Amino acid sequence: MNVYEGDLDEAQLGALVDDLTACAQVDEVRIKGGATSYSAESPGLSDAVSALREGRVRAVQILYRHNGQGWCDTLVGRGATTRLVRNQIPESPPS
């Protein structure tokens, strides 16, 4: 499994949202309110990232497909920066 990590400034976070909106098929957006709690609602990507920027949620998870491959990006607010952890989702073997 491929895992990528990095810190994004405000401009880079905005560019990531723009890229995902334009170039990926976003399947699900999850917001994380606490250490072990996820929201039952599934907000849109822009709304979830706005909540993260405003400090109303702890993290946002974005599950999407790009060029036929599944990915999961987790964004964690860290004050002036946002931590990005990107995991490639392994393909299920054919049955």
Image: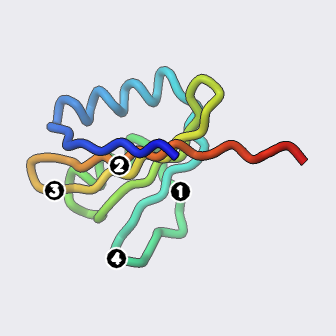
**Residue lying furthest front in this view?**
1
Q: Using the numbered discs, state the Cα–Cα distance from disc 1 to disc 4 in whole angstroms.
A: 18 Å
User: Which residue in the protein does label 3 denote?
Assistant: 78
Q: Amino acid at mark 4?
A: Ala
User: Which residue in the protein does label 1 denote?
Assistant: 42
Q: Is residue 20 above or below residue 48?
A: above
Q: Is residue 86 above or below residue 68?
A: below
Kindly state the secondary structure of the residue where label 1 is placed. Answer: loop
Q: Please report the residue visible at 33 percent of the width from the left and 59 percent of the height from the top.
A: 59
User: Which residue in the protein does label 4 denote?
Assistant: 35
Which is in the foreground here, disc 2 or disc 3? 2
Q: Using the numbered discs, state the Cα–Cα distance from disc 2 to disc 3 in whole angstroms.
A: 13 Å
Please identify the quarter of the rendering in which residue 16 is found: top left
Q: Please report the residue visible at 90 percent of the width from the left and 48 percent of the height from the top.
A: 95
Which is in the foreground here, disc 3 or disc 1? 3
x, y percent for residue 31: 42, 60
- Whichever of callouts 3 and 1 sits on the residue coming sooner in the sequence is 1
**Residue lying furthest bottom in this view?**
36
The color scheme shown is rainbow
- Whichever of callouts 1 and 2 sits on the residue coming sooner in the sequence is 1
- Whichever of callouts 3 and 4 sits on the residue coming sooner in the sequence is 4
Q: Amino acid at mark 3?
A: Arg
Q: Amino acid at mark 1?
A: Ser
